[in-house]
Amino acid sequence: MENYELTDYLAAKKSLASTLHKVEQAIISLEEKQSAGRNMKSQITLSKERVKALKLSLALIEREITRLS
């Protein structure tokens, strides 16, 4: 496993948090389209799974930031 520095974790956290926000906004848009009658179920499910993965990644990164601080 590579050794990462605190700055690496902070940069990754910022990037993943931004991506998380964008995916959460996309879910809202997809759900609106679903309500309008379009079949967006698979895209919504995929996006919700991405949110879970991003939140897990952010939690692990936060743990490392705490450990390194």
Image (cartoon, rainbow, N blue to C red):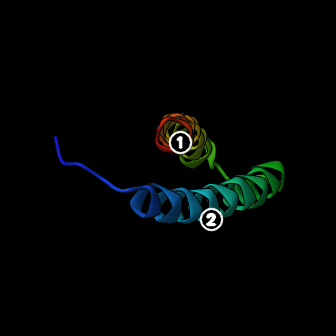
Q: Nearer the viewer, mark 2 or mark 1?
A: 2
For label 2, the crowd category at 10 Å Cα-Cα, with few meaning under 14, some 14 to 19 and many 20 or more, is few
> Disc 1 marks which residue?
42
Amino acid type of disc 2? Ser
Of callouts 2 and 1, the N-terminal one: 2
Element carrying mark 1: helix
For label 1, the crowd category at 10 Å Cα-Cα, with few meaning under 14, some 14 to 19 and many 20 or more, is few
- Find the distance from the CA under tag 2 to the CA under tag 1: 23 Å
**Vertical position of residue 42 compared to residue 63: above or below:** below
- In the displayed structure, does residue 34 sit left or right of residue 57? right
Q: Residue 10: where, in percent of width, then height? A: 52, 59
From this viewpoint, which residue is outermost toward the left? 1
- Judging depth in this view, the residue of 12 and 23 nearest the camera is 12
Which label is found at residue 25?
none
Q: Residue 22: where, in percent of width, then height? A: 65, 64
> Disc 2 marks which residue?
18
**Residue at the location (53% across, 34% down)?**
63
Q: Residue 62: where, in percent of width, then height? A: 56, 41
**Residue at the location (69% across, 59% down)?**
21
- Judging depth in this view, the residue of 32 and 57 nearest the camera is 57
Element carrying mark 2: helix
- In the displayed structure, does residue 29 sit left or right of residue 4? right
